[in-house]
Image: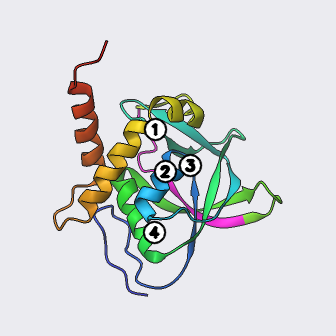
Amino acid sequence: MTSVKMSSGNPVRMGGDNHNVFVYGSLLADEVVRILLKRVPPSTPATLPDYHRFKIKGRVYPAILPVQNNNKVTGRVLLGISGLELDILDEFEDVEYTRSDVEVFLMDNSEKMQVYAYVWSNKDDPDLYGEWEFEEWKQVHMKDFVKMTDEFKEQLELPESKPRVQTYETFYKQENDKPHEP
């Protein structure tokens, strides 16, 4: 299989292989997945043992890192992700995350499955804290995040696309600069 580096640092997969990807943050929202992949692939609930899902200071999305305290992260495995779709997810996760091989437990039948997950690249990041909650994110941040994701996907299709982190920072700066409605 041939591969080249994308701006995310992850190799582009040139081939017809299908992949399974554990998601645990904004990609739990079908709306975000649909914008990125133009479909919502089948999925199954899963847990990732010995990891923690952190909040990140200044960001609305989470990070996961391995921990030694019997923690687990709940999420879902997106099944049958094509090589092209994996490239899109790599670009979306950008340089902040590293695509890693992990082993999850499927909640339906407790079977183990080898999958990819996007793990926070900076294991010593001082901006990681607490526990990120999907339900809180859905209520407080999802609407704007979906808009940002749509903007990112439009950018991705341009010849000189911006990385997702830059799209995120530009989008949220514009949102914060808007006058608040009473």
User: Does residue 171 show up magenta in the picture?
Assistant: no
Identify the residue at image location x=47%, y=28%.
140
Q: Which residue is mark 2?
A: 31
The amino acid type, in three-letter code, at marker 3 is: Leu
The amino acid type, in three-letter code, at marker 1 is: Met
Q: Which residue is mark 4?
A: 86
The amino acid type, in three-letter code, at marker 4 is: Leu
The answer to the question of whether label 1 and label 4 lie on touching residues, with beta carbons closer than 8 A, is no
- Element class at badge 2: helix
Identify the residue at image location x=49%, y=50%.
31
Magenta segment: 113-126
Q: Which residue is mark 1?
A: 142
Identify the residue at image location x=42%, y=37%.
143
Q: Which residue is mark 3?
A: 28
Mark sitting earlier along the chain (4/3): 3
- Element class at badge 1: helix
Kindly report the distance in space between the C-alpha atoms of the residues bearing marks 4 and 3. 16 Å
Q: How many marks?
A: 4
Above or below for 54 versus 13: above
User: Does residue 121 show up magenta in the picture?
Assistant: yes
